[in-house]
Amino acid sequence: MSKQLPDLKFSQLINISFGFFGVQIAYALQSANISRIFATLGADPHSLSFFWLLPPIMGMIVQPLVGKYSDLTWTRFGRRIPYLFIGAIVAILVMCFLPNAGSLGLSVGQAMVFGAVMLMLLDTSINMAMQPFKMMVGDMVNEKQKTTAYSIQSFLCNAGSVVGFLFPFLFATFGISGTAPTGVVPDTVKFAFYIGAAILILCVIYTTVMVKEYPPEEYNEYHPVDPKEHEAEEPGMFELLKKAPSTFWTVGLVQFFCWAAFMYMWTYTAGTVAHGAFDAPTKLTEAGAVVLDTASQQYQDAGNWVGILFAVQAIGSVFWATIIPRFKSNKVAYTVSLILGGIGFISTAFIHSQYGLFASFLLIGAAWAAMLALPFTIFTNSLKGGHVGTYLGLFNCTICVPQIIAAAIGGLILSLFTTPGVLAPEVDMLVLAGILLIAGSAAVWLIKTHD
């Protein structure tokens, strides 16, 4: 019979996840600024979603591998922390290069290829740094405290997001230039990435110093492996998928709707806000398409405001994360959260005030809070045995696959909504996101769980 993992002090639960704060600043800068960066470099709205294919593809490859190999890793520095540290170092380097894609004297095509490669490396490293935090909760936190532990991650995630989202707006307030020549990313965005990289390494160093993972002997006392499983050959990922608990598939279905919805938010919010709330001017491309003028002051102001809206979403998520534990049922909490988020997305079609959009994004924050905390709580409580890291890596595919599918067909869907000779209605993609979240709320009731 295995020993019960001990209760940890609240400060210990915070230390395990503290580096998540820095990682999420990097992730926030990516999610709020990538569409803006590539639109500035010259990408058409119908092709924007293709650049968003790279992050989930890399996440789907990297996170299962980090899970699998960290399950087999034991070093003097820990089991998961080495992967966290390596991922953070790469992320820091890439964050200094990505916003300079338009400043290197490259052609439009070359700048977008360079930016795409940097985006791929950035998301690979963020995924590599992010996954160990989830695994350390699985390794070191008992079932009674897991909801609290993942709620702390949710809080730190959103706190880091607020900081990352606000950086471009704050730098513009401090007098740093928010506009630049056509094809060049403004200094406000560049400085945001530089400062975010510095905070990231400081946070990761803090977690590395403060957290001591269990050595193999002690870990095995808390996570014994079935002797039959130990004697058998190490199962492959496909074999583990066959044996995955039902929650893997049912929670994964909910994840599909949720992450497809947020992929469209990240891709199309900048254009929606620039057109609907800031009246950004349009221009004709050489191909005759009507697009927003990304060099205009209105567009760049809207880009900064997107960071404010995403910060409002994160603040709403922080607040809602304190409400979620008060629900007696995780399924009820999940359902209510996704419905509120769906209403928030749909409302963007009817609100054209930059301040009125605060209400929309506060509601979207409720869905985000649930997506960060509840799926991992429900899934990890159903896991037993010695493959927790691998299963969490595989579970990350339920986040990546819907984003890949959504990004692959996003341009096609937007084309169906677009009238030739008229600006593409990017807001329609946010309405679609709301419908997806409401569908996800219905799928929650397919999950079998013991609350």
Image (spheres, grey):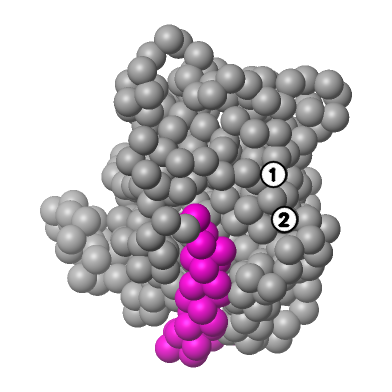
Q: Residue at x 49, y 72 (%)?
A: 432
Q: Tell me, yes or no, whether the highlighted magenta stretch contains residue 128.
A: no
Q: Magenta segment range? A: 423-451
| Vertical side of 131 occupied by 203: above or below | above
- Residue behind mark 1: 302
Of residues 331 and 95, the one nearer the viewer is 95
Looking at the image, tell me whether mark 1 or mark 2 is earlier in sequence order. Answer: 2
Task: Kindly tell me whether residue 160 is visible in this rendering.
Answer: no
Of residues 147 and 398, the one nearer the viewer is 398
Q: Tell me, yes or no, whether the highlighted magenta stretch contains residue 441.
A: yes
Tell me the quadrant of the picture where the C terminus can be found.
bottom right
Tell me the quadrant of the picture where the N terminus can be found.
bottom left
Of residues 206 and 71, the one nearer the viewer is 206
Marks 1,2: beta carbons within 8 A: yes
Which quadrant of the view contains residue 297?
top right
- Residue behind mark 2: 277
Report crowding for label 2: few under 14, some 14 to 19, many 20 or more residues within 10 A (C-alpha): some
| Vertical side of 302 occupied by 314: above or below | below
Main SS class of the magenta portion in the image: helix
